[in-house]
Image (cartoon, rainbow, N blue to C red):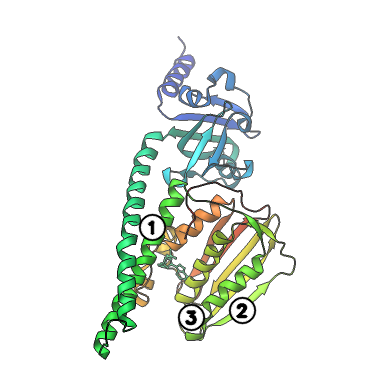
Amino acid sequence: MDSVSAKQDQLNAILSSMAEGLIAVDTSRRVIIMNQAAGILLRLSPAEAQGQNLNEILFLQKDGRDLRVEESPYERAMIDKNIITLTLLDKISLKNRHGQIYPVSLMAAPLLLQGEVTGGILLFRDITKERDVDRTKTEFVSLASHQLKTPLSAISWYAEAMLNEEVGGLNEKQKQYLQNLYDSNRRMVGLVNSLLNVSRLELGTFLVEPEPTNVLELAESVLAELAPALIAKKIKLEKVFATDVPVMNLDPKLARMIFQNLLSNAIKYTPAGGQVTLAINLADEFLLIRVGDSGYGIPTNDQKKIFSKLFRADNIREVEAEGTGLGLYIVKSIVEQAGGRVWFDSLESKGTTFYVTLPLSGMVKKTGSRALS
Ligand code: ADP
């Protein structure tokens, strides 16, 4: 056997014994190589796949929503010349032509020849088992949070009754201690509600009920709720609203949570006398929301972790004790479920700007057992 075909056999043996699915495509997305493991998930033999367009044999979903071709990690990898890694946390599923769906982790990379993109490589693995284990943990958090709600409500109710002196007079110290107890309990209720929201988002049990929504009015009503905090910190508010924002089909509760979280963070993380900006306008097929502040900023080292669950940056913990580190995770989950994106720019001690896009086509109705609260 000549050494070229021996090398070829060796390469084929490596590809066919890999547990990961591997597909390589050329620049027009035609399959050059596909291994057996990929064939099992796609229900297509490597020989059949040869020369087919990747976008016709493999479909990706995020959170149950079909990704547009331009959102696909292999498209982004080839266009941006970047390696993209998606894990269990990214909730990506692969759908084959027969409609079978598998949760996957995947890596997409451009195929580079002398610095030129000559195609792309997609490597993926079925993570059904890992997803099931993760689900069990989330169900536990959901159940535990739910069980905590009843005793917390009881504490709140009794503390309130005592504070109102319904069961006898209180001296100043007693009032102050009870007020502290009441405030701490309120924070705990907030944390438990956020944990419940996180588990509903992760389990996919939350409802999406879109209805024609006037985004500018919704933003105004959130600002009105936050007015006391703005006034207390003497923060200057700048509003830049485009006049051509259409009525959009959004779930008002979910849209409100996006504004509420971003604006309350901007206020919370800006020292007194600073400035907060809310801009709403259109960018192509998307609504673009921009929330800027002149506050503490996010340290460069922490920027990668900012959307992770329970993460709070050190510079913030020193100045603001209150917070759960769940707000941005919830915002990102809602926005991505709606087919939008969220990102930010920030400079420590100078300020931060968060950007959110939402498709003008609106949110897609989703039945579920629970609304986010
Ligand atoms: P929380 O505000 O309850 O801590 P979030 O998930 O909303 O939780 O935010 C996570 C972290 O991101 C914050 O603790 C803070 O470190 C950082 N952060 C969010 N928004 C801003 C902002 N506007 N300016 C500076 N840091 C911010």
- State whether residue 9 appears in this view: yes
Residue at numbered disc 1: 195
Q: Which mark is residue 229?
A: 3
Residue at numbered disc 2: 238
Give how far apart the Cα atoms at labels 3 and 1 are: 24 Å
Residue 245 picture location, percent across and down: 71, 64
Give how far apart the Cα atoms at labels 3 and 2 are: 15 Å
Q: Which mark is residue 156?
A: none
Q: Amino acid at mark 3?
A: Ala
Q: Amino acid at mark 1?
A: Leu
Residue 253 picture location, percent across and down: 55, 61
Tell me the quadrant of ligand 1.
bottom left
Classify 130 as above or below 50.
Answer: below
The reply, left or right, for residue 241 in relation to residue 6 is right
Outermost front residue: 167
Q: Quadrant of the N terminus?
A: top left
Q: Amino acid at mark 2?
A: Glu
Tell which circle, 3 or 2, labels the residue nearer the N-terminal end: 3
